[in-house]
Image (cartoon, rainbow, N blue to C red):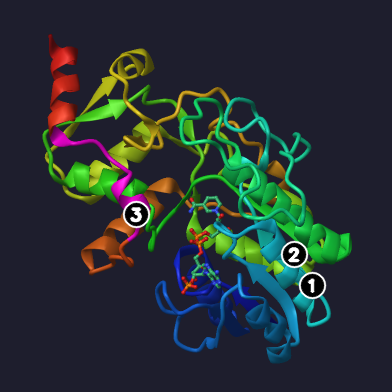
């Protein structure tokens, strides 16, 4: 197989490139050369997806059996559309990595692939769906942009050549967002560790390497349609996840559970201040059985935790990223909340 990874240097795209090389595939990667480095053996193509001339030139480096699009997290649908149009004659299949945020019901409702998608036209620009700074309602900006980008892929490549992958939270070696790294560092520092919600609460992060493997399967199969790509419901719990963090870091710490109600009372920011903690009814109720039936395999979450700690210990710090700083709770604030629990 000969594939083009849009991205290829950073977290998911790098994992895709690495896994493809391990299969003996020929891999090209298109990026600006700003974030990370591609695995050795990848043919690098430099360019910016928002620059029409760079996108127009891309096809001359083909043909490819498939394109795997991992670099559209901050891209307008119209830039995805331009890229897809440029590649349509040069690539057999298009695997577009979207997100569960593209659903209108996320994170309040359980989701299947037939749940309603947000609006977002295929040719929308980057301002589409942008909310005013003082907006207090649901933030659908990212989801609308991604839903529009999905439409851009689907209006350009025929349905028998497109797969849309909608992951939830992605964890694993190379994670630059700072969710699992924050919990690992917190666990390592020991003491009573504030644990959010309930130990048996199900969680569904997907390991970046399992998602990468599934993307490659889709590149080969072509035309799979849409897939929610999360770990299955029942695969892991918050308690198992946090205990794995304590265990792999050799921590002397222990968990002190705080109810959702208490954390909400204290104004703890869901999703970021205590990463992965979210009380919305649909946050961890994404049905990914269609992907499992198509070959998605998910390793135990404890393995993801252990391998991410190993990566951090061996100097694995990604390019500085603003999202990293958005995650985690200060020690002072944690101590204040813990004090309420023992009062
Ligand atoms: N992280 C998560 O938990 C999560 C969850 C659900 C879905 N997703 C989706 O998964 C996909 C992968 O996410 P990610 O976090 O691994 O990576 P990402 O931040 O979306 O993409 C980074 C990669 O894209 C390249 N890139 C960015 N802008 C570019 C541009 N204008 N032109 C050319 N290349 C560009 C970067 O290289 P250069 O900077 O060098 O160009 C880098 O290789 C995204 O589509 C995201 O929406 C992520």
Q: As rendered, which of 327 and 277 lies closer to the eye?
A: 327
Q: Residue at x 63, y 42 (%)?
A: 129
Residue 305 in picture, x, y percent from top left: 35, 51
Q: Which mark is residue 85?
A: 1
2 and 1 marks in contact (CB < 8 Å): yes
Q: Tell me the crowding category of disc 1: few under 14, some 14 to 19, or many 20 or more residues within 10 angstroms, Cα based.
A: some
Q: Tell me the crowding category of disc 3: few under 14, some 14 to 19, or many 20 or more residues within 10 angstroms, Cα based.
A: few
Tell me how far mark 3 sits from mark 2, CA to CA: 27 Å
Secondary structure beneath label 2: helix
Secondary structure beneath label 1: helix
3 and 2 marks in contact (CB < 8 Å): no
Residue 241 in picture, x, y percent from top left: 36, 39
For mark 2, what is the residue?
Answer: 81
Q: Is mark 1 within 8 Å of ligand 1?
A: no
Tell me how far mark 2 sits from mark 1, CA to CA: 6 Å
Q: Is mark 3 within 8 Å of ligand 1?
A: no
* 323 relative position to 24: left or right: left
Residue 40 in picture, x, y percent from top left: 45, 87
Q: Which mark is residue 329?
A: none
Residue 204 seen by the camera? yes
Residue stretch rendered in magenta on the structure: 321-331
User: From the image, which quarter does the N terminus lie in?
Assistant: bottom right
For mark 3, what is the residue?
Answer: 322
Is 327 within the magenta? yes
Above or below for 159 versus 264: below
Q: Tell me the crowding category of disc 2: few under 14, some 14 to 19, or many 20 or more residues within 10 angstroms, Cα based.
A: many
Secondary structure beneath label 3: helix
Q: As rendered, which of 340 and 307 lies closer to the eye?
A: 340
Above or below for 281 versus 312: above
């Amino acid at each position: 197989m000969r594939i083009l990874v849009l991205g290829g240097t950073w977290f998911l795209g790098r994992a895709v490139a690495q896994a493809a090389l391990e299969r003996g595939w020929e891999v090209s990667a298109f990026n600006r050369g700003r974030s990370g480095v591609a695995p050795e053996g990848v043919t690098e193509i430099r360019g910016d997806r928002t620059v029409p001339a760079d996108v127009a030139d891309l096809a001359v480096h083909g043909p490819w059996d498939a394109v795997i699009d991992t670099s559209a997290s901050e891209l307008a649908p119209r830039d995805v559309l331009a890229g897809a149009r440029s590649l349509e004659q040069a690539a057999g299949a298009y695997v577009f990595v979207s997100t569960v945020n593209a659903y209108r019901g996320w994170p309040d409702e359980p989701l299947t692939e037939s749940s309603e998608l947000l609006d977002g036209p295929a040719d929308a620009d980057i301002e589409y769906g942008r909310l005013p700074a003082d907006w207090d309602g649901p933030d659908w900006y990212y989801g609308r942009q991604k839903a529009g980008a999905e439409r851009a892929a689907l209006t350009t490549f025929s349905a028998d050549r497109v797969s849309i992958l909608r992951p939830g939270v992605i964890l694993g070696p190379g994670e630059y967002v700072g969710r699992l790294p924050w919990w690992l560092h917190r666990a390592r520092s020991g003491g009573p560790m504030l644990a959010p919600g309930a130990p048996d609460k199900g969680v569904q992060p997907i390991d970046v390497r399992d998602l990468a493997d599934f993307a490659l399967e889709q590149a080969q199969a072509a035309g799979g349609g849409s897939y929610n790509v999360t770990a299955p419901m029942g695969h892991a719990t918050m308690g198992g996840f946090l205990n794995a963090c304590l265990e792999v870091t050799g921590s002397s710490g222990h968990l002190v559970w705080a109810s959702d109600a208490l954390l909400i009372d204290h104004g703890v920011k869901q999703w970021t201040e205590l990463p992965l903690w979210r009380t919305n009814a649909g946050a961890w109720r994404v049905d990914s059985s269609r992907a499992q039936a198509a070959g998605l395999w998910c390793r135990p979450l404890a393995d993801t935790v252990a391998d991410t700690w190993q990566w951090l210990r061996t100097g694995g710090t990604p390019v500085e990223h603003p999202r990293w700083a958005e995650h985690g709770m200060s020690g002072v604030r944690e101590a204040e909340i813990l004090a309420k629990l023992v009062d």
